[in-house]
Image (cartoon, helix red, strand yellow):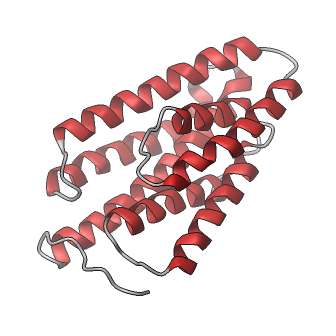
Amino acid sequence: MSRQIGPPILLGALIKLYDDAIDMKLTSNQVILQSLSSLIVLFITWIAMNDFYLSFACFILSLFESGIDTPFWKSLIAVTGVLTVINFFNEEDHRFIHILFSLMAVGGILLLAFIETHLFPEEVSAKKIGVRFLFLIAFIFGACIFDLLPLPEYSKMSLYKACMIMIGYLTISIGIMGFSQFTLKGQPPQPREL
């Protein structure tokens, strides 16, 4: 099975860079922010094309406002909705199993996000870095053993790409929080132009 590694990892990294650029005020440069958002749309389209699982999961996450704190995230409903419809009609088999697995995956993501938000409401902390590091190890391990898992062949690629997205996301998250926590003594970065 041919695996995409780079594009999904880059997508996860871009999502976290954009999110932290807004939340932690890493930059107020609109060209940089708009460029990041354009790249996110490009990579979502590229990675989710012909992948119903991924496009549907992204659509549901956007629709139910998971992590939504700017209008950009809500605007992804249109992109992921169109991809989901195209992918649904391109599916030959297993459409409803794909929907069920996608809903289960989204439910798991939302549950983890909910738990983490309530356990660590702060933007940056050593404990939050530690938990995200453990998640990163778990996703790397999961990606390494994918072929051994008793999953239907048609679902493995989508779940593998989701692991790669999370690896990119968590790597950037840990890096930015680590920089903020250990270099700046826990103070959030001051707004600055990049």
> Percent x, y for residue 70?
45, 55
Q: Is residue 134 visible?
A: yes
Q: Residue at x 31, y 67 (%)?
A: 24
Q: How many marks?
A: 0
Q: Is residue 54 left or right of residue 20?
A: right
Q: Residue at x 44, y 86 (%)?
A: 194
> Who is closer to the viewer here, 109 or 156?
109
User: Does 122 sit above or below residue 107?
Assistant: below
Q: To which quarter of the image does residue 7 belong?
A: bottom right
Quadrant, the N terminus: top right
User: Does 43 sit above or below residue 104?
Assistant: below
> Who is closer to the viewer here, 112 or 161?
112
Q: To which quarter of the image does residue 22 belong?
A: bottom left
> Who is closer to the viewer here, 7 or 57?
57
Q: Is residue 145 visible?
A: no
> Percent x, y for residue 52?
73, 30
Residue extending farthest front: 71
Q: Residue at x 68, y 19 (%)?
A: 98
